[in-house]
Each structure stands twice: as structure tokens, then as C-alpha cells.
Image (spheres, rainbow, N blue to C red):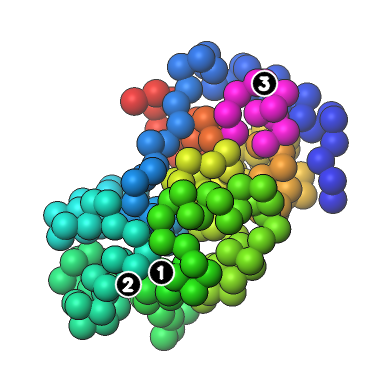
Amino acid sequence: MTVTDAEIKTLVTYCQTNLGDPTVWTTPDGYPNSLALCIIDSIYSTGSHYSSVVNVINRYKESGGENDGALALSRSIKEAGGAREWATTIAHNLKPANTRPGAQLKAEIIEQAAGLMTELGIDTVPDLRSKVEDHPLDNDVMRKWKRLPSQSSGVTYNYLLILAGMPSVKPDRMILRFLAHALGEETELDGRRAVELITETAKKMNVDPRALDHIAWRAASGRELTD
């Protein structure tokens, strides 16, 4: 189902009424110097309280990985003795990728994601951007990322782009909740429509899609709109 002009008009009005002054909206800092941190944050962020993700990121930085690329992330996991040992000794987080019995650890998905990047000749954030910027939603990185266990929705891929500094939208449950509040609970929503709705609304408001995504996420999750 395509996005309509009426939906965008409704969203613009809702944002102007409920989200405060767009000139003070912020975008996530991301990790322009570390594809490793982009990968780790994107995978650990789903279904987790964000403070736990921050803890994982800080522990990886403390291990000496603040500026790591995909190759160094793979090496860190290998040197730890594998994904489970890395999750235990470095990340200190054994959260599974989903709630089904026998689900792989998020650390195991991270290991596979780092290997995927290496396979595609990507090590750094600039490498990633050069591969996907022209066609962010139609490229080999996206297709192969979505084949990783529990990543088929594309939520973590979109968030990876945001963390790498690209104007994407993370269509997670908070963004879907925000759109349902703004457009009505009966509105048909999925990840792709959510990305298009936020992107087109941002364009109409002349703001960065990442900024609208972030403020909408804060509003839907009950946080203060500004730090």
C-alpha cells in the first residue's frame, strides 16, 4: 500500500502539534569511525532497554575496539574463543536474537554480520556508505543482512545506516506505535510503509529523516523530547 498525501499532511500536523520545535531536534551521534560499533549497536538494540546496549558498547570500547572495523570485530570474537565467549567476557550480554527456544545469541548474529561485511569487501563506515548510499534499500548488503537469523524485517539494517550517518529510518515497534497514534490505530503499517511515511514527512518538514525518526521514537517510548 502506497503512502498518500493525506497521510503525510496528517503526520506533518501531528508532528508540529506534538513534537516541539524542529530546530532543536537532534540526530543520533552514531559511530562514523567504527563500523564494528555500528554493527554491535544495531543488533543489540532490538528488544532491549537502550541502557543495556550502551553498556555493551562501552565494554567493547574498553577492550580497545573504539575505532574497529568489521575485520577487527571478527578478530575480537575469534580471539575471545567464539561468539558465546565474546558475549560472556567482552559484551557481558547473552541476550538471544529472539524469544524462541534455541534462538542464536545476538553475539552470534554480530559475528555473522561482521563476516558478511568482510565477504562484501566492507571494513569501515566509508566502505559501507560507498556500497549502499546510491540505493540504500536495493543493494547486496541489505539483501544479505536480511537473510541473517532474525533480521528479515530490515529494522536493524535501517538502524545500521542511521548509525553510519545515513538518512535512514529505523521502523521498530516505537516508530510503528508513533505512526499508529498519529494516523489512527486502524492504519495499515509495516516496516517499509513506516520508512516511507517518516521519510516523506521529514522531506515535507525540511528536516533530516534521522531527526524525525529519533524524536518520534522518544515520544512513543515516553521519554522527554530533548535530553
Q: Which mark is residue 114?
A: 1
Asked whether, in this view, residue 119 is left or right of residue 57, the answer is right
Residue drawn where x is 68% and y is 51% of the image: 135
Q: Which of 58 and 10 is in front in this view?
A: 58
> Which SS type dominates the magenta stretch?
helix
Specify which label sits upstream in the sequence, 2 or 3.
Answer: 2
Residue 205 is tagged as: 3
Label 1: element kind: helix
Q: Quadrant of residue 71?
A: bottom left
Magenta segment: does it hold 130?
A: no
- The magenta segment is 199-209
Left or right of 107 on screen, residue 225: right
Q: CB of mark 3 within 8 Å of CB of mark 1?
A: no
Q: Which residue is drawn at 66% across and 37% down?
A: 198
Question: For the residues marked 2 and 3, what is the alpha-carbon distance in whole angstroms?
Answer: 41 Å
Amino acid at circle 3 = Met
Spot occupied by residue 206 in the image (x, y as percentages of width and height)? 65, 21
Residue at 60%, 53% in the rendered image: 132
* 2 or 3: mark nearer the eye: 2
Task: Say which quadrant the C terminus sits in.
Answer: top left
Secondary element type, mark 2:
helix
Q: What residue type is labelled 1?
A: Ala
| Local secondary structure at mark 3 | helix
Cα separation, mark 3 vs mark 1, equals 36 Å
Sooner in the amino-acid sequence: mark 2 or mark 1 = 2
Above or below: residue 134 compared with residue 91: above
What number is the disc on residue 74? 2
Mark closer to the chain start, 3 or 1: 1
Query: Quick one: label 3, few (<14), some, or many (20+) residues within 10 Å?
Result: some
Camera sees residue 100: yes
- Front-most of 53 and 167? 167
Q: Does the magenta stretch include residue 205?
A: yes
